Image: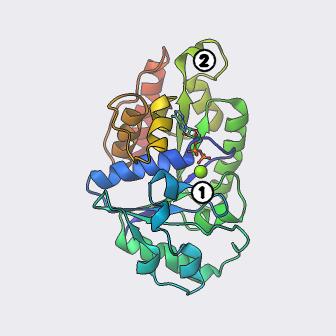
Amino acid sequence: MGKLVIVASGKGGTGKTTFSSQVGTILSTMGHMTVLVDADAGFRNLDIALGLESNVVYDYSDYITKNADIDEVLIKSPGYENLYFVAAPQSAATTDFDPGRTEQFWNTLKSRFEYVIADAPAGMGDGFRFAADYADEAVIVSLAESTSLRDADRVIEAFEDNGIEDIRLVLNRIRPELIGKKVLMNIDDCIDVLSIPILGIVPDDSAVAECAAAGCAISPSETGAARAFFNIAQRMAGENVPMMDFDTSKKSIWSRVRKTFKKSQ
Ligand SMILES: Nc1ncnc2c1ncn2[C@@H]1O[C@H](COP(=O)(O)OP(=O)(O)O)[C@@H](O)[C@H]1O
Ligand SMILES: [Mg+2]
C-alpha cells in the first residue's frame, strides 16, 4: 500500500505545483510508481507543468461521480515509465463529494502506486479537504517570509487536527543575498517559527521558469533548484542526504536534520 502525500501551503504561489511536478517526476525516475493528482480544482495547472494538458479527458470528479473508472482518469506520462497523472475539474463548484467514494478514490490509487502526491490548493477550503482528510503525510511549501510562514502555521494546525504526524517543510525560492539583507528570513528562524522538520531548501532559480515554459517536467540542470528537488526526492524515499549549504547557518541546519533523522528512526 502506498501513501498519500499532500503538498500544501497557506499562501498561494509558494511553489506547490512546481514541487509536485519536479519531485513526483524524479521519484518516478528513481523507479517508484508515482501518481500526481491535481487537487487544485478551478485553478488547475499541474497538467501544464507536466506537459499533459492535451491528454486530459476525464478528471477525478468523473471517478467520484461514477462517470469514469480509475483507468479512464489515470493518464500515463508518455515520457516517464512510472509516472501517472490525474487531472482536477475545471470548475471548483462541485467539491462536495461523497466521502465514501472519495476515500475509495484515494485507496485505489494507494493500492496501485507507492507515492500518491496531491497538489493542493492554497489555504484550507473544500479542495484542500478533498486531499487533506485522507492524507498520510504532508509537505508544506513556504517562502522564507513571515506572511507565508504565518499562513503555513495555520495549515499545519489543520493537519495536526486531522492526526497527520508526518508534516515536513520545504522552504522555496531562497536567495542568500536577500537573507543577508534581511528581506528574507534566515532558514533557522523559519524552522523555529513552524517547529516542523525540514524536508528541503530550494533556491530561487530562473531555470524553474525556463523549464516550465519549455513544458519539461525535470530541469536538465544539475545545479540550483534541480539539485534541491533531486535531494528532496531522495529524502522522501528514505535516504539521508545533506541539506544544501546556503549560508552561515549550515551548522545549525545540520543539527536539526540529525535530530529529525534520529526522531524518524
Ligand atoms: N525555486 C524556484 N525558483 C524560481 N521560480 C520558482 C521557484 N519555484 C516556483 N517558482 C515560480 O513561482 C511561480 C509559482 O509557482 P507554483 O508552483 O505555480 O506555485 P503554487 O502551485 O504554490 O501556486 C511560478 O511562476 C513558478 O515558476
Ligand atoms: Mg499550484
For the view shown, which residue lies furthest in the bottom direction?
66
- Residue type at tag 1: Ala
Residue found 56% across the figure and 87% down from its top: 66
- Residue type highlighted by circle 2: Leu
For the point 42% across and 26% down, the residue is 254
**Mark 2 / mark 1, whichever is N-terminal:** 1
Tell me the quadrant of the picture where the N terminus can be found: bottom left
Task: Give the crowd class for mark 1: few <14, some 14-19, many >=20 residues within 10 Å.
Answer: many
Is 201 rendered above or below residue 141?
above
- Helix or strand or loop: what does disc 2 sit on? helix
Give the vertical position of 94 relative to 236 (above or below): below
Q: Which residue is mark 1?
A: 120
Looking at this view, is 32 or 218 the one in front?
218
Kind of element beneath mark 1: loop
Indicate the position of residue 179 as horizontal and vertical percent values: 59, 18
Residue 219 in view here: yes
Q: Is residue 237 visible?
A: no
Residue at which label 2 appears = 178
Q: Is residue 9 left or right of residue 87?
A: right
Q: Residue at the spot x=47%, y=26% of the render?
A: 253
Q: Label 2: how many residues lie within 10 Å, few (<14), some (14-19) or many (20+)?
A: few
